[in-house]
Image: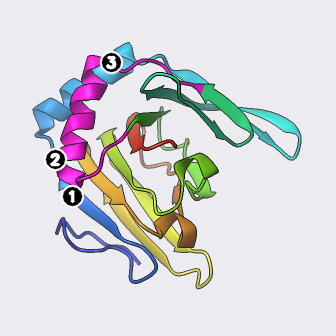
Amino acid sequence: MDLFNNDPTANLLPYDGPVTYQGRILPPVEAIHYFDCLMKTIEWKNDEARIFGKHFITRRKVAWYSDAGYSYTYSNTTKNALPWTSELLSLKKLVEDMSGSSFNSCLLNLYHDGSEGMAWHSDDERSLGKETTIASVSFGAERKFCFRHKVTKQTICLVLESGSLLIMKGATQTNWLHRLPPTKKVTTPRINLTFRTIN
């Protein structure tokens, strides 16, 4: 099922969790400006994971920024936080104003082209707590983004535009998986920022 619904109050999920798509929250010129700044100023590193005892390094790059003193562990690897940049602080304030939530950290992903994606997963690490809110901002190439219910397997997909905001709240991470499927149609980079609250 594909949804292209820009009603910022509409829940994209039929049950078991609220997800809203705010659409573009920045004009195209600003979105391009942020994309260029983030490409140049973020300390990008290849992502690493330990799965079944094996060490994997991805082509996709990541960066972790937050308030002082926080670290983040997923896929059995721990990332220590970098201090906020001015661009990230500006985006954090904008996202907080639009979502009504406050965040103390941001995980950034750089996908060089459509061959790089993200497998089905939930952001349900213990450090995020229950009923957490995650605000996802996209810049660069438009990409399809999908949700799949953990029990019913129902799938919901939408296209995330450059400069857009997606908000996942409540029980979404408990009941739904999400992924960024790879595609041969996209040949340009995408940057994704996920603002979170680490406990």
Within 10 Å of the Cα at label 3, are there few (<14), some (14-19), or many (20+) other Cα atoms? few
> Left or right: where does residue 194 sit relative to residue 91?
right
Q: Amino acid at mark 1?
A: Gln
Q: Considering only order in the chain, which callout, 3 or 1, is on the residue closer to the N terminus?
A: 1
State how far apart marks 1 and 3 are (Cα).
24 Å
Q: Which residue is mark 2?
A: 25
Question: What kind of element bears circle 3?
Answer: loop
Question: What kind of element bears circle 2?
Answer: loop
Which image quadrant is residue 65 in? top left
Residue 48 seen in render: no
Residue 160's tag is none
Q: Which residue is mark 1?
A: 22
Q: Position of residue 56 (x, y in %)?
A: 76, 34
Q: Which residue is mark 3?
A: 85
Q: Amino acid at mark 3?
A: Thr
User: Image point 16% across, 69% down: which residue?
Assistant: 7
In the depicted structure, whether residue 99 falls above or below residue 33 = below
User: Image point 24% across, 44% down: which residue?
Assistant: 95
Residue 183 seen in render: yes
Q: Considering only order in the chain, which callout, 2 or 3, is on the residue closer to the N terminus?
A: 2
Q: Nearer the viewer, mark 1 or mark 3?
A: 3
In the depicted structure, whether residue 116 falls above or below residue 6 = above
State how far apart marks 3 and 2 are (Cα).
20 Å
Tag 2 and tag 1, C-beta contact below 8 Å: yes
Q: Amino acid at mark 2?
A: Ile
**Which residue range is magenta in the image?**
80-103
